[in-house]
Image: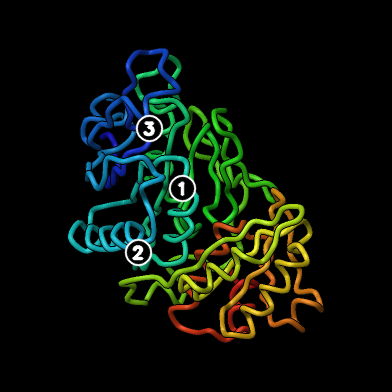
Amino acid sequence: MATPLPRIAVIGTGGTISSLGASSLDVLDYPDFGQKLTCEALLDRFPETRLVADPMPVTFRQVGSTDIGPKDWIEIRTLIHRIAREEPAIAGFVIPHGTATLEETAFFLNLTLALATAQPVVLVGAQRPASALGTDAGMNLVNALRVAGSPEARGKGVLVVLNDEIHAARDVVKTSTYRVQTFRSFDFGALGHVDGDGPHFYRAPLKAHMPDTPFAGSELADLPRVDILYSYAGADGDLVRAAVAAGARGLVSAGFAPGSPSPDQREAFIEAARSGTVIVQCTRAASGRVAPRRHLRESGLVAGEDFSPQKARILLMLMLTASSDIAEIQQAFQAY
């Protein structure tokens, strides 16, 4: 007897993977002039998806991922929890998503999902629209379904699958605007690959992740404002002060490598920290740690470790829902 295919919930959010351009050569203007498929229509366009899984389509949004933010993250989290309760046969989840903010949605879910049976959750995107010549949408979607249905994917947190590679949500970043090999985990590499015979894992994440985090049990209705400030030669502190005045409870400094803002920015960040705003120091460099150096400790600033500024922002937002204690927040950056 044939083994039944795994039942996978596919939560469509839009993005390039679901987009149709004006022609098969439109790989540029489709976000502004094309259309986006519903999740069911996306699966129908690539019937091979039903050869590797029994997909259950759920259309959540049909937007570019620049339109997806913290409120949507919370709604997606709630939706995943509801489906897991109501559909006990679900073996895993796949979320087709635009690539611009895919890593941010993935990291938020990696910290906050509370799935009692730890079903795999896989985010997937594409660099070329579904209608394009040579689109990567179909194979990426098939591979994501394969990973979501794989017992080996359990216990590894939220995963990102594109270009035949499996990445940890914590580590992966988008590195190229148009190339299909855009997603990279710079310092640590992919967790594995998806070949013609299925997923193959070669390592596993060690840092804490869903469902074993304090955030997984939290009721999240809203997230506090946290802004990111970018450093560049000659930058002053005006934007730092403006963000504080706008109500930011936390700020992430995307500083020069290995983790320093301009002198005027530093003065403004220290001033903000003294007034109660939590400051996390990261780097604008593509990879590497910001270590808890003496000047950060003495100034009451948090070292952002190896997090990108955008992921540091998410962790800081979550921490600020429970605490503003600098020592606790620093410990969290080292734990996650």
Which is in the foreground here, disc 2 or disc 1? Answer: 1
| x 48%, y 50%: residue | 159
Which is in the foreground here, disc 3 or disc 2? Answer: 3
Q: 31 above or below 208? A: above
User: Percent position (x, y) of residue 232?
Assistant: 72, 53
Question: Tag 3, which secondary structure?
Answer: helix
Q: 1 above or below 308? A: above
Which is in the foreground here, disc 3 or disc 1? Answer: 1
Q: CA distance from mark 2 to mark 1?
A: 27 Å
Question: Tag 2, which secondary structure?
Answer: loop
Question: Which tag, 2 or 1, sits closer to the chain's start?
Answer: 1
Question: Which tag, 3 or 2, sits closer to the chain's start?
Answer: 3
Q: Examine the rendering and report whether any part of residue 82 can be seen.
A: yes
Crowd band around label 1 with a 10 angstrom C-alpha radius: few (<14), some (14–19), many (20+)? some
Looking at the rendered structure, which numbered label has been put on residue 101? Answer: 1
Q: Quadrant of residue 290?
A: bottom right
Please indicate whether residue 166 sits to the left or right of residue 218 in the image.
right
What residue type is disc 1 on? Thr
| x 73%, y 61%: residue | 289
Q: Which residue is mark 3?
A: 17
| x 55%, y 33%: residue | 177
Crowd band around label 2 with a 10 angstrom C-alpha radius: few (<14), some (14–19), many (20+)? few
User: Percent position (x, y) of residue 252?
Assistant: 60, 65
Q: CA distance from mark 3 to mark 2?
A: 28 Å
Q: Examine the rendering and report whether any part of residue 4 can be seen.
A: no
| x 36%, y 68%: residue | 114
Q: Depth check: 20 or 8 in front? A: 20
